[in-house]
């Protein structure tokens, strides 16, 4: 039987920002690891974007050789404590687990988290690196793609400098994911490991403004762009400019940047109303709705135009939100925001929906039900319907070819229209998962190595 992860009680955790899952004990991890069949041709590895040798690291856990387990993980994954928390393993490695044919799959993500946390409780071990090759690489953006590309290149012997526009590293990992899902100290320890590989970091530096791409090309032998998807998408409905309507990106960045998760230790200007509605049903939407509760909202809603079955959020995140009392309004579409006398939002007007035929994504298309309009009393709206790539760098250098969606055009290995300049992560693919961004950073590191050789 799959080992159940201990968790904070829902009634208690909505009052704090501490991590919700508490992690496996050593006994639980060993028991879970012994469920692995050690398949000769493991399907789970095919589902891992960074190609971790999953059966081997699990085998070491079962044998209580934990240092070998983490060494195996870090050959391919420099951020195992991060991916063990936020990776959608249920549709990737665990989704292909052989045991899933007869029962619950091996808890690969939880085992990854276990050994990563165990190592960070002790001294970090820095792996052997190739001899320095006197080649310099610039990595632009310190999100999951940039961190992965930088760490892989550093291990190959390259002199790597990582540039970050904000005052601290991590990108979406630090500013876009709440503390209760990914604690900041865990992320900082993972990044500390990468700096010990030799990666140099320059924060408060906006490539395209502080330094141009041309200037980087003069100093470095190759460049990787991993600036992410930080441009919010809007519904373009009446009232969207009212006070109290935020993009998910702005809201979560404010909470993380201003350390609202440390309240009341830190006074913070992040204001939340008593009745909060989050538009959308992805992981970011769950993060917004659950964060609103922790900041004092009395009612927190998820409004989504499709049914629960079509919701893109991870099942675990949906269940956590339900346990915490989030109210779900499925098959519901906001049509306008209604203001009070002070220019603030006071209500959302919505219309009920039904599902029609599947669209291009394979999900059933939502259709309006005529004469089904209704209103909800709401004083804060968080719009979490997706994000577009950050347009700054492509706009400041016309040599960078982009798609109609604003992403940088790349070959599968990350090669761009400029020789020696590579790109990966959300800036190349559009908004996706952390682990997919890491996978593209890893591919680009290999391509850069081949290019320079």
Image (cartoon, rainbow, N blue to C red):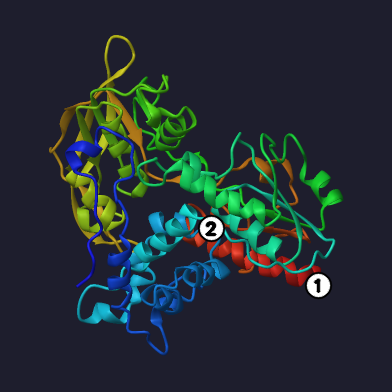
Residue 1 rendering spot, x and y as whole percentages: 19, 73
Residue 204, picture quadrant: top right
The residue lying toward the viewer, choosing from 269 and 14, is 14
Answer yes or no: is residue 229 visible: no
Look at 69% across and 55% down and name the residue there: 224
Picture coordinates of residue 149, whole percent (x, y): 63, 59
Vertical placement of residue 77 versus 187, above or below: below
- In the rendered picture of this protein, how many numbered marks are placed on residues? 2
Residue 292, placed above or below residue 33: above
Residue 90 shows in the view = yes
What label does residue 429 carry, if any? 2
Closer to the camera, 299 or 414? 299
Q: Secondary structure at mark 1?
A: loop
Q: CA distance from mark 2 to mark 1?
A: 27 Å
Q: Quick one: label 2, few (<14), some, or many (20+) residues within 10 Å?
A: many
In this view, 407 is above or below 15: below
Instruction: Please indicate whether residue 94 sits to the left or right of residue 198 in the image.
Output: left
- The residue located at (28%, 22%) in the rendering is 273
Q: Residues within 10 Å of mark 1 (few under 14, many from 20)?
A: few
Question: Above or below — where is 232 with respect to 318?
Answer: above
In this rendering, the label closer to the viewer, 2 or 1: 1
Front residue (pair 108, 420): 108
| Labels 2 and 1 touching (C-beta < 8 A) | no
Please name the residue that numbered disc 1 is placed on. 453
Q: Residue at x 47, y 27 (%)?
A: 258
**Disc ID at residue 173:** none
Locate residue 116, reporting x and y percent.
45, 59
């Amino acid at each position: 039987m799959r080992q159940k992860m201990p968790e904070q009680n829902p009634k208690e955790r909505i009052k704090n920002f501490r991590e919700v899952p508490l992690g496996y004990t050593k006994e639980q991890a060993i028991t879970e690891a012994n469920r692995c069949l050690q398949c000769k041709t493991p399907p789970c590895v095919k589902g891992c974007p960074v190609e971790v040798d999953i059966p081997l690291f699990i085998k070491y856990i079962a044998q209580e050789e934990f240092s070998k387990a983490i060494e195996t993980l870090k050959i391919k994954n420099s951020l195992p404590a991060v991916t063990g928390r936020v990776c959608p393993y249920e549709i990737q490695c665990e989704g292909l687990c052989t045991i899933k044919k007869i029962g619950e799959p091996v808890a690969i993500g939880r085992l990854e988290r276990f050994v990563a946390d165990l190592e960070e409780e002790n001294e970090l071990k820095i792996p052997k690196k190739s001899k320095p090759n006197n080649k310099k690489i610039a990595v632009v953006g310190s999100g999951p793609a940039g961190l992965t590309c930088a760490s892989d290149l550093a291990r190959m012997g390259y002199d790597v400098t990582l540039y970050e526009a904000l005052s601290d590293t991590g990108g979406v990992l630090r500013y876009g994911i709440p503390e209760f899902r990914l604690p900041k100290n865990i992320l900082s320890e993972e990044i500390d490991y990468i700096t010990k590989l030799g990666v140099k970091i320059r924060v408060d530096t906006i490539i395209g403004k502080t330094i141009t791409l041309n200037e980087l090309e003069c100093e470095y032998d190759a460049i990787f762009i991993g600036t992410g998807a930080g441009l919010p998408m809007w519904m373009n409905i009446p009232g969207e400019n009212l006070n109290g309507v935020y993009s998910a990106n702005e809201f979560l960045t404010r909470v993380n940047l201003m350390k609202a998760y440390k309240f009341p230790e830190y006074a913070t200007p992040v204001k939340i109303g008593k009745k909060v509605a989050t538009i959308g049903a992805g992981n970011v939407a769950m993060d917004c709705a659950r964060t609103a509760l922790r900041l004092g909202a009395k009612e927190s809603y998820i409004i989504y135009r499709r049914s629960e079955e079509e919701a893109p959020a991870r099942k675990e995140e949906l269940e956590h939100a339900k346990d915490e009392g989030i109210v779900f309004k499925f098959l519901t579409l906001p049509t306008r925001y209604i203001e009070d006398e002070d220019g603030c939002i006071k209500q959302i007007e919505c219309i009920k929906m039904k599902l029609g035929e599947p669209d291009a994504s394979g999900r059933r298309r939502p259709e309006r039900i005529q004469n089904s309009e209704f209103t909800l009393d709401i004083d804060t709206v968080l719009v979490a319907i997706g994000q577009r790539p950050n347009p700054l760098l492509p706009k400041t250098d016309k040599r960078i070819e982009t798609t109609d969606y604003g992403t940088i055009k790349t070959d599968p290995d990350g090669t761009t229209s400029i020789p020696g300049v590579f790109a990966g992560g959300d800036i190349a693919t559009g908004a996706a998962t952390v682990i997919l961004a890491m996978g593209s950073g890893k591919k680009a590191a290999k391509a850069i190595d081949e290019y320079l050789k």
